Amino acid sequence: MAVRVRWFLVFLSVFYLIRLYLTSVVELAPDEAFYWYWAKHPDLSYLDHPPMVAYIMAIFTALGGDTAFFVRLGGLLCTIPAHALIFFSAKRLYPDERKARWELLLVINCTLLFSTGCLVQTPDTPLLVFWSLALYCGAHIATGGGTRWWLLSGIALGLGLLSKYTMILIVACQFLFLLLCPNQRRWLRHPAPYLALVIALTIFSPVIYWNWQHDWASFGFQLNQGFSYD
């Protein structure tokens, strides 16, 4: 098993070295250039999306300059903690399935969507990190974890909402999980899940404030996009 793990780590390292090289030689996609423009004009939110992608780009371009490499570097680095969180979530949920944890990471890295997300910096990249953090908290909650995991889940939800609005879907997933699992329904009568929502909304409040200042433009734009069939 140890030999397999070493080979997998070698495989993952090679993948990341290739991705690191490609981030510096492939031209920016139109969406990336658009988000980079946001990074040059920091705000509480933007019409298309919440601000996290712009903040990440602003930090790394301030450190290294306005090059494709530094525009994308933050997104590539975001995928590393996402790997760890997914791995340890699987470990928590399936402690006896050691092989499956590594196979899960292998499958993820071989998917086109994840590999593209490692190269192209979009709002989905930070979303992946905070969704994975929420998943990790959920794994602890489902296996006997206490209130603190709900509080951390609220932080993950708030930061995920600062990345992309679709993070809100995890709330519906959590509610259905609590509703459909008899041994988890006690949480519906416990203040912890609701406190987690308060924490998330507090973190997300700058985006709400921005939308209030701009006639709810971003929320309206995304709802129109989501329900448009043109």
Image (tube, rainbow, N blue to C red):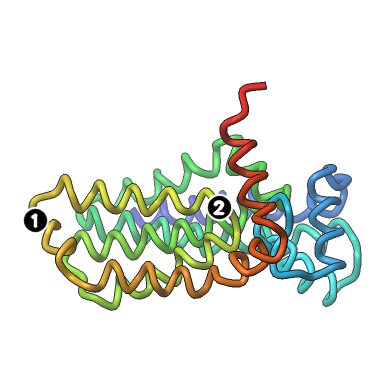
On the picture, is 158 further left or further right than 21?
A: left
| Residue 209 sits in quarter | bottom right
Label 2 sits on residue: 165
The circle drawn on residue 121 is none
Instruction: Choose between 78 and 211: the one closer to the eye.
Output: 211
The amino acid beneath tag 1 is Asn
On the picture, is 115 further left or further right than 22?
A: left
Instruction: Choose between 20 and 148: the one closer to the eye.
Output: 148
Residue 31 place in picture, x, y as percent: 79, 45
Residue 213 place in picture, x, y as percent: 70, 66
Tell me the SS state at disc 2: helix
Q: Quadrant of the C terminus?
A: top right
**Number of residues whose C-alpha sits closer than 10 Å to that of mark 1, classed few (under 14), some (14–19) or many (20 or more):** few
**Number of residues whose C-alpha sits closer than 10 Å to that of mark 2, classed few (under 14), some (14–19) or many (20 or more):** some
Label 1 sits on residue: 183
Instruction: Choose between 149 and 88: the one closer to the eye.
Output: 149
Contact flag, marks 1 and 2 (Cβ < 8 Å): no
Which residue is painted at 40% across and 45% down in the image?
104
